[in-house]
Amino acid sequence: MDRQPLRALGIGSGDEVIVPSFAPESSAAAVVMVGATPVFADIDPRTYCLDPASVEAALTPRTSAVLAVHQFGHPAPMRELGELAARQGIALVEEEQPAEDVGEVARRRAHARFLDSALTGVVVPYVEPGAHHVYHHYTVRIPGNGRPDRDAFVRALSRRGVRATVSVPTPVHRLAAHRSREVLPETELAAAQALSLPVHSGLTQRELAHIADACNALGGLL
């Protein structure tokens, strides 16, 4: 993430900025680069975006801003976060979204709708009513006993010719550069269970069907 919006607000040494831990490290790194301290809040387990209640619980007298990340293409709860920021007299900084081809986004959404209807045995992405998910990632959950099950699922899909990815293998607050003592149960669970399936606009219907069949064939085997 670009640190310029934080600099423009005068945020620096002595300030705290609330950020998600289930997100790219670049968000916390941008805070550190202006001399401020990242404070990690938990996520909504359905959207993977910041949970406003957790943000409110993380506020301190040193809090200067909240950094909202639109995780995997699902928009962050900007209205709720904006109302919270206004009440507290702090800034709300929104992750910059790249310009995208409308046709590509439409194809990804169509692919996501197919996978939503075809997949069984995994928890498909949730979309908040009225939200416009652009599916930078199609992220599902593998219910089970945590990371070993999810990682085994990824390896099994690879053997079937499906390249799944783990977008957030380690929450940022667990990385050595940002290690903190925040307790973030939903973040930890998502990091253990979530994986992303291919959903890029170039996929054919046959490839999408193969992805769904490969996932469904694993069922409760893992």
Image (cartoon, rainbow, N blue to C red):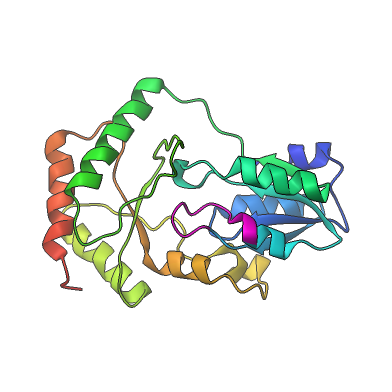
**x and y percentages locating residue 172 in the rendered image:** 58, 63
Q: Is residue 170 left or right of residue 41?
A: left
Question: Is 81 covered by the magenta stretch?
Answer: no
**x and y percentages locating residue 64 in the rendered image:** 82, 51
In which quadrant of the rendered view does residue 123 lie? bottom left
Q: Is residue 50 left or right of residue 138?
A: right
Name the residue at 63% across, 40% down.
79
**x and y percentages locating residue 165 in the rendered image:** 35, 55
Q: Is residue 214 above or below residue 108?
A: below
Q: Is residue 216 left or right of residue 185?
A: left
Q: Viewer-proximal residue, 174 or 108?
A: 108
**x and y percentages locating residue 140 in the rendered image:** 33, 55
Q: Is residue 160 above or below residue 148?
A: above
Q: Is residue 153 above or below residue 28?
A: below
User: Bounds of the magenta span?
Assistant: 44-53
Q: Quadrant of the N terminus?
A: top right
Residue 160 can be seen in this image? no
> How many numbered circles are shown?
0
Name the residue at 75% across, 47% down.
85
Residue 137 can be seen in this image? yes
Q: Is residue 196 left or right of residue 69?
A: left
Q: Quadrant of the C terminus?
A: bottom left
Q: Viewer-proximal residue, 57 or 154?
A: 57
Name the residue at 53% across, 30% down.
98
Q: Viewer-proximal residue, 162 or 61?
A: 61
Magenta: main secondary structure equals loop
